[in-house]
Image (cartoon, rainbow, N blue to C red):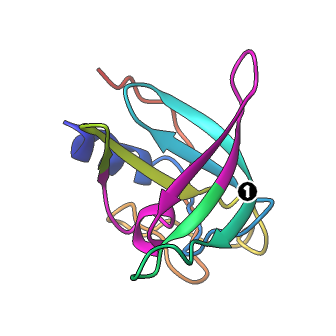
C-alpha cells in the first residue's frame, strides 16, 4: 500500500538525494505530513551507523520528536517500520537551478530535469 503512495509522490515532488538540518521532509505514515529537520546526531550507543534525527512535525499543534534511523531510512532510500507501521521520509527540493529544465517522457527527473506539477487524487 505505502509503496504505491510513495511512487505517486515521487511523480509529484522533486526530492533531494540527501537530508540535512534545515530541510523540510515529507513523511508518509498512517497520514502524510511535513517536518523540519532540526538535528541529526550520531547514536554511538548502537554498533551500526544509526542517527538521532530530530524533527519538528509541522502539524497543529507542532510537535517535536526524535527518531533513531539509519541513513537509508531518513534519506528516502527505503521504506521502514516503526511500531509495526510502515513509514517513508525524504527531503523535498523546493527549487534551485531547475527553471529551464524539461520533463522527461517517463515523468522522472535527473540533472537538468524539472517535474511538471499537477494535482492527483490519491485514494
Comparing 20 with 68, the one in front is 68
Residue 55 on image: x %, y %: 68, 47
Q: Quadrant of residue 86?
A: top left
Percent x, y for residue 46?
A: 44, 74
The residue lying at 67 percent from left, 61 percent from top is 93
Local SS, label 1: loop
Closer to the camera, 51 or 4?
A: 51
Asked if residue 85 is among those painted magenta in the image, a careful observer would answer no
Task: Please state, as top left, top right, bottom left or bottom right, where the C terminus lies in the image.
Answer: top left
Residue 34 appears left or right of 108 = right
Outermost top residue: 60
The picture places residue 108, in percent across and down from the top left corner, at 41, 66
Q: Residue at x 50, y 58 (%)?
A: 68
Which image quadrant: the N terminus? top left
Packing grade of label 1 (10 A; few <14, some 14-19, many >=20) is few
**Magenta stretch encompasses residue 69:** yes
- Number of numbered discs visible in the structure rendering: 1
Magenta segment: 54-80
Residue 77: give x, y in percent of width and height. Answer: 38, 69
Tell me the residue that label 1 is attached to: 94
For this orientation, the residue located farthest to the left is 1
**97 over 66 or under it: above or below:** below
Q: Quadrant of the rendered structure where residue 80 is?
A: bottom left
The residue shown at (50%, 78%) is: 110
**What is the quadrant of residue 19 in the picture?**
bottom right
Residue at horizontal 49%, vertical 46%? 12
Amino acid at each position: 500500500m505505502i509503496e504505491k503512495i510513495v511512487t505517486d509522490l515521487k511523480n509529484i515532488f522533486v526530492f533531494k538525494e540527501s537530508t540535512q538540518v534545515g530541510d523540510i521532509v515529507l513523511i508518509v505514515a498512517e497520514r502524510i505530513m511535513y517536518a523540519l529537520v532540526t538535528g541529526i546526531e550520531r547514536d554511538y550507543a548502537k554498533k551500526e551507523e544509526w542517527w538521532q534525527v530530530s524533527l519538528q512535525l509541522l502539524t497543529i499543534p507542532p510537535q517535536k520528536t526524535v527518531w533513531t534511523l539509519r541513513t537509508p531510512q531518513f534519506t528516502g532510500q527505503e521504506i521502514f517500520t516503526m511500531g509495526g507501521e510502515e513509514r517513508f521520509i525524504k527531503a523535498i527540493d523546493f527549487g534551485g537551478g531547475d527553471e529551464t529544465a524539461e520533463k522527461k517522457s517517463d515523468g522522472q527527473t535527473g540533472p537538468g530535469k524539472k517535474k511538471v506539477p499537477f494535482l492527483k487524487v490519491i485514494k
